[in-house]
Image: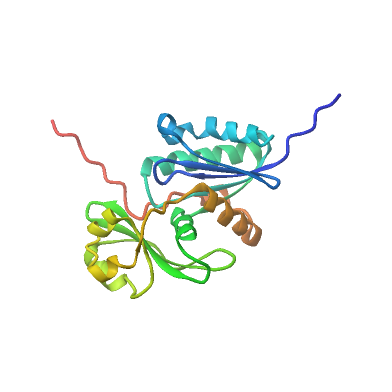
Amino acid sequence: MPTSPSPPARIALETSSRPPSIAVQVGARNAFRRLDEDRRNASDLLPVLAELLEELGSAPAHIERIVVGTGPGSYTGLRVGIATALGLARATGAELVGVPSVEALARAGLQIDEEGVVLLDARSHQLYYAHYRRTRTGIEAVVAPTITTPTELVELLPDQIPILADPGVAEAAELNASQRARLRSGFAPEAEALLELGLARLEQDGPMQLTEIRPLYLRPFAVHPRRR
């Protein structure tokens, strides 16, 4: 008796921060997983993805849509995540879209019709900054992700609206007491929110060319020579 073909799957890979996460949608069923302590490296994405697809009765060969987070964030994580997404798209012919990872963070931290800014620690006394509005259909960029400093942030940061940042980032950003009162902490880019945003973008704008999918680094990669 012939076996039924595996149903098509839609996936999201989010590797800009640790731990990386994966979301899979097959029909009306969804699965999500953060890589655990033993499998936190972004290079472990494919084995975990295969497990989730199997749980939902599909397989890697039947992936039809791929969403990948483009950052900003971990240089290594983004390289591996995007390379994995590109490899899967080439192997399966799946439609592919890249979505800034900070949009997924804004999706988690803002209510519908609410504006807010995202602050992340970019190291070396710098910050990643973005200003978003959450709508009923997705996330709109008021100010696209950029790199800034605590001094420059004084001019960028609007009054009153929420600031999505962890306390350590607030310290690095030198936020004052009034600004810290607007903090919303504990949010991170997750593949579940990324999948929702990416699928909506695919419906609206169609897939991106593979050559368009690039990490959102925002600054040159700095090589620090080892001390002898």
- The one nearer the camera, 29 or 2, is 29
Q: How is the image coloured?
A: rainbow
Give the residue drawn at x 53%, y 41%: 22
- In the rendered image of this protein, does residue 41 appear above or below residue 133? above
Residue found at the far right of this picture: 1
Q: Is residue 206 left or right of residue 101?
A: right
Q: Say which quadrant the N terminus sits in.
A: top right
- In the rendered image of this protein, does residue 48 appear above or below residue 196? above
Q: Is residue 46 left or right of residue 188?
A: right
Residue 2 percent across, percent down from the top left: 84, 26
- In the rendered image of this protein, does residue 161 appear above or below residue 123? below
Residue 39 percent across, percent down from the top left: 44, 31
Q: Quadrant of residue 43?
A: top left
Residue 112 percent across, percent down from the top left: 53, 68
Q: Say which quadrant the C terminus sits in.
A: top left
Residue 161 percent across, percent down from the top left: 38, 72
Residue found at the far top of this picture: 1
Give the residue drawn at x 64%, y 62%: 204
Residue found at the far bottom of this picture: 159
- The one nearer the camera, 216 or 55, is 55
Question: Can see residue 25?
Answer: yes
